[in-house]
Image: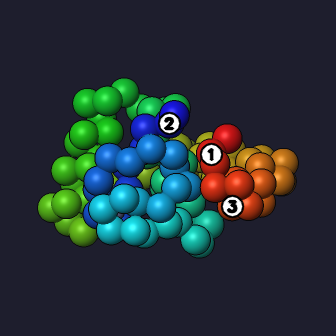
């Protein structure tokens, strides 16, 4: 499964869009989903995920993506959304 950082508490969880097993937060808005999608081992190596996790715990917010990366992640997210994978995900409670 995908290793991902919780956008709210920085806990390392599995599946970008799965509820966090620590704070129960699940990304709902597009922005929350994009940042959750970004902060996963699809895109970053473990040490970077650890840094992001630590950043969230210290600042209580996810690290800002640079505008270029944000564009890429937003596009990826739009593709995932357009494919209907998200609806399926929420129905089955599984990640892609
Ligand atoms: Zn959490």
Gap between marks 1 and 3 measured at Cα: 8 Å
Q: Residues within 10 Å of mark 3 (few under 14, many from 20)?
A: few
Residue at left offset 26%, top offset 49%: 53
Q: Earlier in the sequence, mark 1 or mark 3?
A: 3
Q: Position of residue 82 (x, y in %)?
A: 83, 53
Residue at the spot x=30%, y=62% of the render? 22
Q: Residues within 10 Å of mark 1 (few under 14, many from 20)?
A: some
Residue farthest to the front, as pictured: 92
Q: How is the image coloured?
A: rainbow
Q: Is residue 42 left or right of residue 51?
A: right
Residue tagged 1: 95
The residue at 64%/55% (across/down) is: 93
The vertical placement of 2 against 12, above or below, is above
Query: In which quadrant of the rendered view does residue 31 lie?
Result: bottom right
Q: Residue at x 42, y 69 (%)?
A: 25
**Residue 30, labelled with which disc?**
none
Crowdedness near tag 2: few (<14), some (14–19) or many (≥20) residues, C-alpha within 10 Å? some
12 or 68, which lies in front? 12
Q: Is residue 93 left or right of residue 11?
A: right
The local secondary structure at tag 3 comes to helix
Secondary structure under the numbered disc 2 in the rendered image: loop
Instruction: Tell me whether the residue at label 2 lies in contact with that at label 3, contact meaning CB atoms closer than 8 angstroms.
Output: no
Q: Say if 41 sits above or below 26 in the image.
A: above
- Measuring from the top left, give residue 33's x and y in whole percent: 56, 60
Q: Is mark 1 within 8 Å of ligand 1?
A: no
Can you identify the residue that label 2 sits on? Answer: 2
* Residue 38 coordinates in the image, percent (x, y): 50, 46
Cβ atoms under marks 1 and 3 closer than 8 Å: no
Q: Which residue is mark 3?
A: 90
């Amino acid at each position: 499964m995908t290793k991902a950082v919780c956008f709210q508490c920085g806990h390392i969880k599995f599946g970008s869009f799965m509820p966090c097993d620590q704070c129960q937060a699940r990304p709902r808005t597009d922005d929350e989903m994009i940042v959750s999608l970004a902060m996963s081992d699809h895109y970053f190596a473990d040490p970077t995920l650890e840094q992001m996790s630590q950043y969230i715990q210290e600042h209580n917010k996810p690290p800002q993506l640079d505008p270029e990366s944000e564009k890429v992640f937003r596009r990826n997210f739009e593709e995932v959304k357009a494919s209907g994978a998200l609806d399926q995900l929420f129905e089955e409670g599984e990640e892609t």
